[in-house]
Image: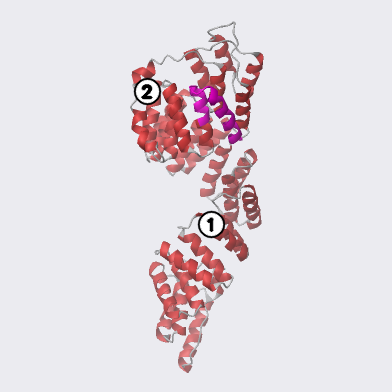
Amino acid sequence: MRRLIITVCLLAAGNLSALASDSHRSLDCTEVAAWLTGDVSSQRLSQLVRQYGFNGVLSSRDEALLRSAGAQAGLLDAIHKSATSTDTASPCPGSLWRANAFTRQKQYEAAENLVRLLLDSDKDNAALHFALGALRVKQGDLDEGFDEFSTAKELMPGLPETHNRLSHIFYQSNDSDSAIAEARTALSINPGNAEAYRDLALGFDSDARYDDALRVLHKSLAREPANAETYFDLGIVLQDKEDLSGAETAFRRAIKLDPARWESHYDLAMVLQRAKRYDEAIAEFRKAKGLDPGEPSVRGDLASTLSDKGDLDEALAEWRALFSMAPDWKLGHDLFAKALMAKRDYSGAAWQLSQAVERNPTSAEQHRLLGQCWLLLDHKTEALRELQIAVELGPDSWLAHHYLGTALFEVQKFYAASREFHEALRLQPSADNHYALAACLITMGDYDDALVELNTAAHLDPARSLFQHRREELIKLMRTDKPRHVEIPSHFEIKAEPSVPH
């Protein structure tokens, strides 16, 4: 990540005594509304208001707008009781309320534009920088989010939430050490900060310290026993620990506490999908989709699970809806293609796979799948190109060698094909690979070795009558000693994957 590693030591080396003695002036409505826009909880804001005081009184308009922005009764009560002055209003800019509304509607760019305009005339407002950082992170820009949270920290160093957000950015950047350091800094400022315990747990989780993560999550729950986000994080850690049953319980508890959180339904669905409980997983994916129809990952994993269950028509409908809604979505083109291939729409599959390799040119599997499609469409030159790339990128893939051998066989390069089938056999001694090599050897006139390969194929998969029939034909051929070309059957081209021995 740009700048993150360079500055982490500066972030972790703050003067903690200065943090504890921070003398920030009383808060105003703008700051409270900005922090709400940045997803600071109403409960936590009520603590900040009691800590710093509140400048002036709320107008009835701003109080109503605070409620609509997510302020709960406890926060409003804290504002009324903590007012440092009762004869002046503490007005909020109307554009900030609009920014908050845009945020709740997930129109983050529109919200960001309004916050930036406010910062033009109030550059030293830590809460506005915090809100802008949160909006940049929501749009996937961790670098600028990091910069804005860092500015907020410098302007108001005693706010543990800023360290929490920096910790989460480091977690998302796979920097577990820095994530842990930032969470611990937040806890040093406010030892009872439940969010800091959650971020510390995620840092431990990314470092595979699952027991430590669970320990601090239970500390968080001791402070906020009904926090849906904590149960969600508990589910994440248990899932990473391969405790699927525990993860399921945690996600269900998160859903009970906050049924409108789509992420909990989504991650529960992922656990159920891993357990091959497809109907239950599909139901949870559908709930997540209902809560956030515009989230591409939900539709993608729903489509993938429908494919796993065998509901190909429904899966294809979800894939089409996904790429119609998010044409630049980078994931899932290969899975969409597999569903199309299962429906024998090889042209459509080839187009999807072309998109997949364009977005991920180093994926051996996606090049291999595209090569298989070209074989089925009888585009031999294109098939050879993709399968050669697949073998170069994934030399240990027996499937890549197998299909490259098939493509070489199709263009009558039998010796090169036999080398690929030999390599496929080395990696996976399956009946299909023995049979494919036998076909090459017959064409090359090496009947004795071909018979050995056919005998082995028939032994490995005695239920496949094809192998026995070809063996009998070869024996007759050897008796007549007439040259013969043997074709590899179509199932080698991708009608189905080659069988794997049990």
**Residue 445 location in percent, x, y?**
43, 87
What residue is shown with label 1? Answer: 356
Please provide percent x and percent y for residue 38: 53, 28
> Which of the colour schemes (rainbow, by chain, secondary structure, one colour) is used?
secondary structure
| Residue 152's disc number | none
Quadrant assignment for the N terminus: top left
Disc sitting over residue 188 in the figure: 2
The residue sitting at the top extreme is: 87
Picture coordinates of residue 269, whole percent (x, y): 56, 44
**Residue range corresponding to the magenta coloring:** 106-132
Q: Position of residue 384 (x, y in %)?
A: 49, 71
Q: Is residue 89 left or right of residue 421?
A: right
Out of 238 and 346, give the one closest to the viewer: 346
Q: What is the magenta segment's predominant secondary structure?
A: helix
Please say if the residues under marks 2 and 1 sit with CB atoms less than 8 Å apart.
no
In the image: residue 125, left or right of residue 76: left
Residue 78 in view in this figure = yes
Nearer to us: label 2 or label 1: 1
Nearest to the observer: residue 174 or residue 286: 174
